[in-house]
Image (cartoon, helix red, strand yellow):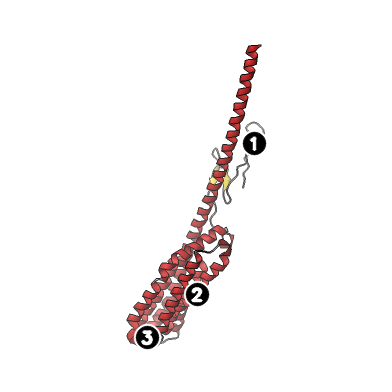
């Protein structure tokens, strides 16, 4: 990027070209001098540099393990509460939680050796993992709703809602994963509640769309802030790199100038000696 400054103090145009990092620009304001304008960080996801997209995906993988490790604990708590309800699918659901935990942890471990060239592959795996986790949690809204026990039904709904809320903090840097988890985890309980005649489930059915919309809105806002932060950090690194290169070139030019000054000084000294001798 470059900017052209024109002046007419001497009746002639004066042009100064200034190299800038990508995304920055200079603005000739009403006052003296040039002003550096803030880079525009409101860009679409597909327009982000590869380094920024990779940083967002890496942040998502790094925040995932603490959430995944809570899955077995949640299964243990649910088993302790619903164990006496005689639910047939309680054991298979808990086994599904363990399988989701192991698969997600293995995915996070494999990402440690991933390359930026395979961004699409690891992004797709993360979305697939979020979909699987959302389905397992969502099945609790279909299989673990104890009939005619509003307290237990509300407990299961809070478990599902807590998992959705956790996904907002852990998956907001990767928007497809967040959207898939929220939708697949809350959709089953919503459908089951709409088709049920229990008063508690009818109330839950009315709450689910509201909770989904609120969490998605918070997740979108968090994703936007993280995206802008990652882009600004990338631009700062680019600026520092270019400033270091410019400093190196300036030092080389200064050294060359010092050499020329020393040579001219020696020539003048020899010329002075010749003059004195003549």
Residue at image coords 40%, 67%:
66
Q: Nearer the viewer, residue 162 or 148?
A: 162
Q: Nearer the viewer, residue 234 or 18?
A: 234
Front tag of 3 and 1? 3
> Which is nearer the N-term, disc 2 or disc 1?
1
> Which is nearer the N-term, disc 3 or disc 2?
2
Query: Marks 3/2: CA distance?
Result: 25 Å
| Residue assigned mark 1 | 14
Mark 3: few/some/many CA within 10 Å (<14, 14-19, 20+):
some
Left of 32 or right of it: where is 14? right
Label disc, if present, on residue 278 of the rendered structure: none
Q: What element carries label 2?
A: helix
**Are the residues tagged 2 and 1 within 8 Å (C-beta)?**
no
| Residue assigned mark 3 | 146
Rendered image quadrant of residue 258: top right
Q: In which quarter of the image is the C terminus?
A: top right
Query: Marks 3/1: CA distance?
Result: 81 Å
Label disc, if present, on residue 131 of the rendered structure: 2
Mark 1: few/some/many CA within 10 Å (<14, 14-19, 20+):
few
Q: Position of residue 256 (x, y in %)?
A: 60, 33
Q: What element carries label 1?
A: loop
Residue at image coords 56%, 68%:
121
Residue at image coords 42%, 80%:
95
Q: Position of residue 179 (x, y in %)?
A: 50, 71
**Are the residues tagged 3 and 2 within 8 Å (C-beta)?**
no
Q: Position of residue 190 (x, y in %)?
A: 45, 80
Q: Is residue 167 visible?
A: yes
**Are the residues tagged 3 and 1 within 8 Å (C-beta)?**
no
> Which is nearer the N-term, disc 3 or disc 1?
1
Q: Residue furthest top?
A: 278
Front tag of 3 and 2? 2
């Amino acid at each position: 990027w470059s900017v052209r400054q024109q002046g007419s103090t001497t009746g002639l145009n004066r042009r100064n070209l200034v190299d800038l990092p990508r995304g920055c620009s200079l603005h000739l304001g009403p006052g003296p001098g040039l002003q550096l304008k803030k880079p525009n960080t409101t860009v679409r996801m597909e327009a982000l540099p590869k380094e920024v997209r990779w940083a967002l995906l890496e942040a998502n993988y790094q925040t995932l393990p603490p959430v995944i490790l809570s899955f077995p604990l949640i299964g243990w708590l649910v088993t302790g509460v619903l164990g006496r309800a005689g639910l047939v699918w309680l054991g298979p659901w808990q086994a599904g939680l363990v399988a989701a935990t192991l698969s997600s942890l293995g995915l996070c471990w494999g990402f440690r050796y991933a390359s930026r060239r395979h961004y699409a592959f690891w992004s797709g795996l993360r979305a697939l993992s979020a979909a699987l986790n959302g389905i397992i949690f969502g099945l609790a809204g279909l299989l673990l709703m104890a009939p005619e026990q509003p307290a237990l039904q509300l407990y299961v709904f809070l478990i599902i809602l807590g998992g959705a809320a956790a996904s907002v903090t852990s998956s907001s840097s990767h928007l497809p994963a967040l959207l898939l988890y929220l939708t697949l985890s809350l959709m089953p309980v919503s459908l089951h509640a709409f088709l049920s005649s229990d008063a508690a489930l009818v109330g839950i059915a009315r709450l689910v769309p509201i909770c989904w919309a609120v969490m998605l809105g918070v997740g979108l806002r968090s994703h936007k802030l993280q995206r802008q932060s990652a882009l600004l950090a990338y631009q700062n690194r680019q600026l520092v790199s270019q400033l270091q290169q410019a400093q190196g070139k300036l030092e080389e030019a200064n050294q060359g100038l010092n050499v020329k000054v020393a040579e001219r000084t020696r020539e003048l000294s020899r010329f002075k000696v010749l003059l004195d001798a003549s």
